[in-house]
Image (tube, grey):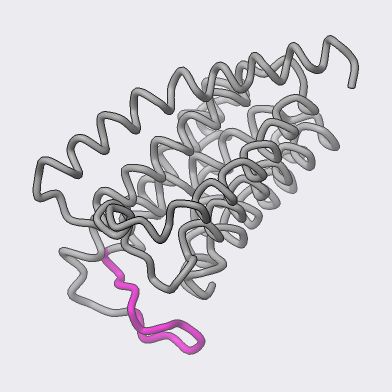
Amino acid sequence: MDNELLIHILRCVGVLVGYIVPSVLVLLAIRLFSKVPSFVFRKLLHMVALICVSLMILSAGSWQAAALTAVILAIVFYPLLASVEKAPWYPRLFVEKSPGEIKKSMLMLFLMFAGIIFVAWGLCGQRHIAATAILMWGLGDAQAALVGIPYGRHKVGLPHTDGKKSWEGSLAMLGISFAVGAVMLATFQGLPPATAFVLAAAGALVGTATELFSPSEYDTVTVPIAIVATLLALLPMAG
């Protein structure tokens, strides 16, 4: 590893630590000293991680540094969480859907970040598409839970869905994904507003549909991949 790449990686790590640490400390204080529901805390943690990773991508000096930083975090977080998951305070902070689910999700999450960075930025030269896809998925998925769990009254009964997701949550995801995508594509990708709206709508539709039909333990991977694939496929048509 050359010195320049090492410097870029250290800068990426610094950006993530600078944003994530204070944000997580605030969220932990809220979790410990308030009655915020577990699913809300969980989704707030996801949103912090996704926003921070997107900021890291947008400020990174190279795609190699950004991707390697994500891999390094996966390598660090998995054994760290494995070492503390038996502690008595762990269940108070995290509610797992199954034993070991948190550490597995974190591993998949950061490896997914690395893969998207490699494909969108490394192979296709589209740094902003990588950040856009991650935010469209992450903020949309969080909104689906924040709306769907407390307010979802109409369950999706389509074939090959799990019957737990609601139309209210899916519509919330669709709307937030579209809004985030349109802003990112117009602001950072420099697309005309009308073009940004079309691409964002396509990405949001594909992402929401993928989330509906994906097993919940795998949508961390399937949804962002579907969104980034849609955006990369349609981007050449935008001129």
**Whether residue 94 is situated above or below residue 52 in the rendered picture:** below
**Whether residue 226 is situated above or below residue 17 in the rendered picture:** below
Left or right: where 127 falls relative to 108: right
Residue reaching furthest to the bottom: 159
**Whether residue 43 is situated above or below residue 14 in the rendered picture:** below
Question: What is the quadrant of the C terminus in the image?
Answer: top right
In the rendered image, residue 45, in percent from the top left (x then y), is placed at 36, 43
Q: Nearer the viewer, residue 178 or 110?
A: 110
Label tally: 0
x 43%, y 73%: residue = 98
Q: Nearer the viewer, residue 46 or 106?
A: 106
User: Toward which corner of the image does residue 131 lie, by quadrant?
Assistant: top right
Considering the whole magenta stretch, tell me its main secondary structure: loop
In the rendered image, residue 43, in percent from the top left (x then y), is placed at 33, 49
Magenta segment: does it hold 140? Answer: no
x 65%, y 35%: residue = 129
User: Toward which corner of the image does residue 190 lie, by quadrant?
Assistant: top right
Residue reaching furthest to the right: 2
In the rendered image, residue 1, in percent from the top left (x then y), is placed at 89, 22
Q: From which residue to which does the magenta span run?
A: 156-168
x 40%, y 26%: residue = 21
Residue 85 in sight in this render = yes
Left or right: where 170 falls relative to 15: left
x 54%, y 51%: residue = 106
Magenta segment: does it hold 161? Answer: yes
Residue 206 in sight in this render = no
In the rendered image, residue 123, in percent from the top left (x then y), is placed at 85, 37
Left or right: where 101 falls relative to 10: left
